Image: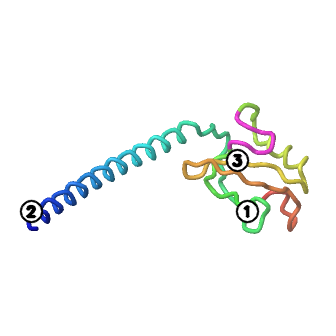
Amino acid sequence: LQNDHKALMKQVEEALHQLHAREKEKHARDEAEALAEAMSQNQSLPQAFAKVNAVTSGSPASISGLQVDDEIVEFGSVNVNNFQNLQNIATVVQHSEGRPLSVTVIRGGKKVHMGLTPKRWAGKGLLG
């Protein structure tokens, strides 16, 4: 009976070692995949053409979720390929009054999409 117990305990011990070894391998593989994904996301981020310096509280920009230090990669039809100056954005804002437009920014190393509807507010223009 003691020999059976010893043999059984040895099998349990070996099984536990194998289980822990597989778990360690899985954890290392998961970490490597997460690192590779993070690196590929950083490499695939589009180039920004402008950076948000200020957002007035209660403005359409604020309501849409735009934040200071957001790097703009797309503002309606404006992107890095056709951006020349801030007048490009002003023109899109004027032509989009009351209609939502798509805005894409890079925030904290991640691409963030939002909708922004330019509208007049408290006499401060269309965006804020």
> For this view, does 87 lie left or right of residue 57?
right
Is label 1 or label 3 in front?
A: 3
Q: Furthest-front residue in view? A: 1
Q: Which residue is at the front of the view, 57 or 14?
A: 14
Residue 39 position (above or below residue 20): above
In x, y percent, where is residue 17?
23, 54
Residue ID at (63%, 37%): 47
> For this view, does 6 lie left or right of residue 92?
left
How crowded pointer 2 is (Cα within 10 Å; few <14, some 14-19, many 20+) is rated as few
Task: Tell me where the magenta segment starts and ends, as one range.
Answer: 73-80
Pointer 2 with pointer 1, Cβ within 8 A: no
Q: Mark 1 points at which residue?
A: 62
Q: Name the residue under label 2.
A: 3
Q: Name the residue under label 3.
A: 104
Residue ID at (85%, 58%): 125
Q: Distance between the residues labelled 1 and 3?
A: 14 Å
Residue ID at (68%, 46%): 72
Q: In which quarter of the image is residue 63?
A: bottom right
- For label 3, the SS is strand
Q: Magenta stretch containing residue 38, yes or no?
A: no
How crowded pointer 1 is (Cα within 10 Å; few <14, some 14-19, many 20+) is rated as some
